[in-house]
Amino acid sequence: MAGKLYPMCARCKKPVCAPIIKVDENPQVGEAPAFCPMKLMPEVIDKSVAEYDKPEVYEFARLASVQEAECYERLPDGLRTKFPRVEELIQFAHKCGYKKLGIAFCTGLTNEARLLSDILENKGFEVVSVGCKVGATPKERIGIKGEEKIASADMWETMCSPIAQAEVMNELKVDFAIMLGLCIGHDTLFIKYCHVPMTVLAVKDRVLGHNPLAALYLSSSPYYRRLMTKKPETINK
């Protein structure tokens, strides 16, 4: 890696990609840091932007940007946010003309999935919901040993099956899939196998009430300072 530059937008102190300029002015890309992807990979950026010329992508992106703007209101003292994510979800789904929504959820969040179903149905949507344990497939199917189970070794333990969740969504042709609290790795498989448009309402964080950013905000505090410790973690395989 020595001597080779990679995009590091998280380290950027001069974001020329979002300048405060007039609409008839142009961003000064030449002033961007050397690690800016607009400097390192301009052909990739151009190819990506060309994708928005596809009619279905163009309209989806346009509606997403409209939705983004509608989440703010301009007041005398500045901008103020208006909608939580669940309301954004409802508004965006209506904008896109979606009728049938699918919820792929962790069974540990069954109550949340039920509440979300009620909310979406009250807003006029048809709602399909599929829990992660669908299929009742034992963990032994993927080589899990007794000592690797959450419960005791002699107990049945159903594996999470995000692929089955995704394929149910695909088969029923839901207009929009919503991922709710799937585990790390399981969410990756769901995203890989889900072939309908999808979004994420919430991700799994067993400790922080499904708010993983809290650990980042507390990374300088005594509670989660260990996150910044420069030493390799012990990895169990």
Image (tube, grey):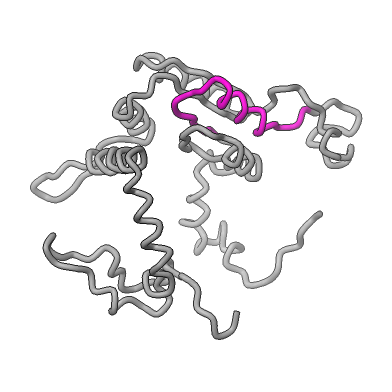
Quadrant where the image shows the C terminus: bottom right
Left or right: 32 in relation to 235: left
Name the outermost residue toward the bottom.
Answer: 3
Left or right: 190 in relation to 125: right
Instruction: Tell which of 216 and 42 is nearer to you.
Output: 42
User: At which x and y percent is residue 194?
Assistant: 56, 35
Q: How many labels, in total? A: 0
The correct choice, above or below, for 171 with respect to 209 in the image is above
Name the outermost residue toward the right.
Answer: 154
User: At which x and y percent is residue 143?
Assistant: 86, 40
Residue 101 picture quarter: top left
Residue 76 shown in magenta: no
User: At which x and y percent is residue 197?
Assistant: 46, 34
Q: Is residue 10 visible?
A: yes
Left or right: 217 in relation to 133: left
The correct choice, above or below, for 213 with respect to 119 in the image is below
Q: Is residue 119 visible?
A: no
Please report the residue visible at 64 percent of the width from the left and 41 percent of the height from the top.
189
Residue 150 picture quarter: top right
The segment highlighted magenta reads 158-180
User: At which x and y percent is residue 12?
Assistant: 38, 72
Quadrant where the image shows the N terminus: bottom right
Name the outermost residue toward the left.
Answer: 76
Please report the residue visible at 49 percent of the width from the left and 50 percent of the height from the top.
214
Instruction: Tell which of 234 and 22 is nearer to you.
Output: 22
Please report the residue visible at 26 percent of the width from the left and 63 percent of the height from the top.
18
